[in-house]
Structures are given as structure tokens and as C-alpha cells.
């Protein structure tokens, strides 16, 4: 799904007013906003002005089966009003209600001057987990662009101080050599992304 399509679909979800047809009176009633599940909120100063913005990562239950879809949005206050300069779909459930958001981080994760957003989602037992990383488009920006995706059976943060490191378990049945792998991913300032350094499975 393109960013434009995602923004359009979420904009519909966040509409607050619904005009009731057939009344002849033009009356309207409030429609409750969609419930945000597994909400993570991070207070950040993204544009370096006096006011802090926030990054929110959450699940929405969508479709007939109400399966989770993960989004993040940037929340800002302008002239007393709340606006969302960016709303992005991160992960779409393959159909399992147990899938979706597990954990999220939003801060300077690689020790440069920009903020990163890291979103960890559970897909299925056969796929495992997906770590999706976004990077601030530039310093003092409210826009984020996708940096990379990493898939593994289990993904955890192994070093919390920037530049953070990721431990990724690849089970034997997902490895070409038939054994468990405990990968360690580090930030590469040359490649401008996290790369596997230890016990790596070819991708």
C-alpha cells in the first residue's frame, strides 16, 4: 500500500462526523473514534522548536475478521489544534488476531542527529517477527522514511544505548544449515543501516 493510499484510508477512519440520511433535517451525530490498541507514545522534539511533538505507534483492528494493522503517526499542536503531519501503515496482519504490535522505540537509535522509529510486529509462527525501522527524513523534520525491514523468529534489543544493537533468533527450520542462529546486528555508518555481524544467516 502506498503512503498516499494509507493516509487516505486512515483519514476516513479518523473522521469524526457522520450525517444521517433520510431524516430530512440534516441532523448529525458523533461517531466514536477507532480504538487504538497496544498504544505506545513517545514525546520528542522533532523540529527543535519550543513545543514537543509525539510519535504514537498502535494497532487498529480492521476488516471483517478484526485483525490488527500497525500504524505510526506524528502528532503536533499548531495554533491550538492537534494535527497529524504523517500517518503510516507499518504492518498488515496476515490474518491472525494474535499478530501485530509487540514493541516500539522512537528516539535517536544510531547515535546520529536524527530520530529513528523501530516497530516490532509478530506475524505468524512460520514467519516469526518483523522489525521495521524508519528514519527522520532530515534533522528538524516531522517526516519519516522507511530505512529497512528485518525478519526473524524472535527480535530483541541487546544494547539500549545508541547505537543500539539487535539480537535476532533464526530457528533451525528457517536456516539453510539446519541449526539455530543467534544473529547480532550493529549500525553501519558506511551502509547507513543495521547489518548482521555475528552468526549470520544468508538473506
Image (cartoon, rainbow, N blue to C red):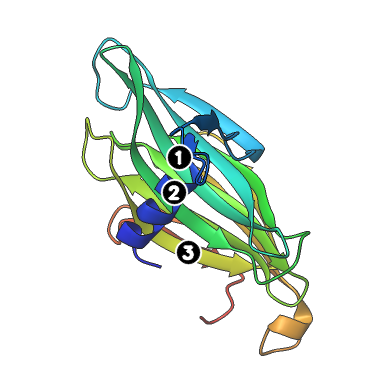
How many labels sit on residues? 3
Tell me if mark 2 has few (under 14), some (14-19) or many (20+) residues whose alpha carbon lies within 10 angstroms of its own.
few
Which residue appears at 52% of the width and 33% of the height?
161
Secondary structure at badge 3 equals strand
- Residue 52, position as x, y percentages in the image: 36, 17
Question: Looking at the rendered structure, which numbered label has been put on residue 149?
Answer: 3
> Does residue 174 appear in the picture of this structure?
yes
Above or below — where is 193 with respect to 60? below
Label 3 and label 2: CA atoms lie apart by: 27 Å
Which residue appears at 36% of the width and 57% of the height?
147
Which residue appears at 36% of the width and 36% of the height?
115
Tell me if mark 3 has few (under 14), some (14-19) or many (20+) residues whose alpha carbon lies within 10 angstroms of its own.
some
- Residue 65, position as x, y percentages in the image: 73, 64
- Residue 20, position as x, y percentages in the image: 52, 41
Tell me if mark 1 has few (under 14), some (14-19) or many (20+) residues whose alpha carbon lies within 10 angstroms of its own.
few
64 and 198: which one is in front? 64
Q: Quadrant of residue 74?
A: top left
54 and 119: which one is in front? 54
Which residue appears at 62% of the width and 70% of the height?
199
Q: Which residue is mark 1?
A: 15
Amino acid at each position: 500500500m502506498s503512503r498516499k493510499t494509507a493516509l487516505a484510508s486512515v483519514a476516513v477512519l479518523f473522521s469524526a462526523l457522520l450525517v444521517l440520511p433520510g431524516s430530512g433535517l440534516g441532523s448529525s451525530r458523533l461517531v466514536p473514534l477507532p480504538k487504538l490498541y497496544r498504544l505506545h507514545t513517545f514525546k520528542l522534539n522533532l523540529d527543535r522548536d519550543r513545543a514537543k511533538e509525539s510519535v504514537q505507534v498502535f494497532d487498529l483492528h480492521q476488516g471483517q475478521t478484526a485483525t490488527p494493522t500497525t500504524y505510526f503517526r506524528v502528532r503536533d499542536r499548531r495554533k491550538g489544534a492537534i494535527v497529524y503531519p504523517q500517518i503510516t501503515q507499518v504492518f498488515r496482519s496476515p490474518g491472525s488476531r494474535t499478530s501485530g504490535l509487540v514493541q516500539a522505540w522512537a528516539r535517536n537509535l544510531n547515535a546520529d542527529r536524527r530520530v529513528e522509529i523501530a516497530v516490532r510486529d509478530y506475524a505468524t509462527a512460520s514467519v516469526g517477527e518483523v522489525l521495521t525501522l524508519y528514519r527522520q527524513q532530515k534533522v528538524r523534520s516531522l517526516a519519516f522514511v522507511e530505512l529497512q525491514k528485518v525478519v526473524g523468529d524472535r527480535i530483541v534489543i541487546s544494547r539500549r544505548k545508541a547505537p543500539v544493537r539487535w539480537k535476532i533468533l533464526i530457528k533451525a527450520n528457517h536456516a539453510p544449515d539446519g541449526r539455530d542462529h543467534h544473529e547480532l546486528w550493529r549500525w553501519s555508518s558506511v551502509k547507513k543501516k543495521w547489518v548482521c555481524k555475528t552468526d549470520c544467516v544468508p538473506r
